[in-house]
Amino acid sequence: MTQTMGVWALGDELLRDAVLRTGEGGQNLETGLADVVNPRYTDFNAEVRFERCPGVGGLRAAIEESADAFAMSEWSPHVVVLGTSDDVLDLAGRDPNPRMAMESFDQELTEVVDRIKGVCEAHVLVANVSTYDPADLTSNFSDSQAETVSMRAHRVNLALLHASHRLGFSV
């Protein structure tokens, strides 16, 4: 008997394109997550749902809205995949002080992961962010007044590493 394995992906278009194939709403890949999982694990049928959420604040709002829907629905995710690339771009808008911006990000991420585990009892995966930025030609950060996107990505990835150890999710 085949069981449905629900995968709920919450994030931006980069995450959408990583989990959904072209015919399912993705824009870049011929093969989506379900195409990879289903042939390999014959006892499961992966059903992937994507929802556009800007950053962890958007994730928190989406989870709050969906909490009752999970309790009253036959479909409940076994795995929740969170995207964080919007947060890299949003860090400068949170607080000009990088340390304070990261504390805010960490607090919101903790609330999101705790809420997912409390409502869905799902495994949580958080997609980290590539630190490579071909447009960034900075070679010396000592004179730089503003953080580059690459530096913010490093900060988010480091925060994810620490939070994953503390909260028990995978990166």
Image (spheres, grey):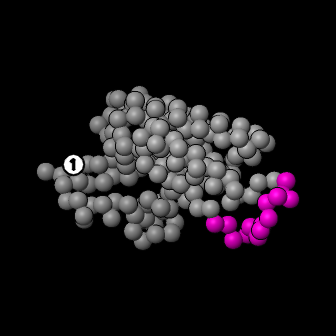
For the point 18% across and 52% down, which residue is it? 2
For the point 55% across and 59% down, which residue is it? 14
Asked whether 166 or 16 is in front, the reply is 166
Is residue 141 shown in magenta? yes
For the point 74% across and 58% down, which residue is it? 148
Q: Is residue 90 visible?
A: yes
- Most extreme residue toward the left, as rendered? 1
Q: Where's residue 102, x and y in %?
A: 66, 41
Q: Is residue 94 visible?
A: no
Residue 20 to residue 112: above or below: below
Element class at badge 1 = strand
Point out the stretch of residues depicted in magenta.
Answer: 132-145
For the point 58% across and 61% down, which residue is it? 130
Asked whether 2 or 93 is in front, the reply is 93
> Counting other residues with Cα less than 10 Å from the Cα at mark 1, is it few (<14), some (14-19), or many (20 or more)?
few
Quarter occupied by residue 80: top left
- For residue 163, side relative to residue 69 (left or right): right
Asked whether 164 or 89 is in front, the reply is 164
Residue 157 to residue 93: above or below: below
Amino acid, disc 1: Gln
Residue at which label 1 appears? 3
- For residue 81, side relative to residue 74 (left or right): right
- For residue 143, side relative to residue 161 (left or right): right
Q: Where's residue 62, x and y in %?
A: 52, 37
Q: How many marks?
A: 1
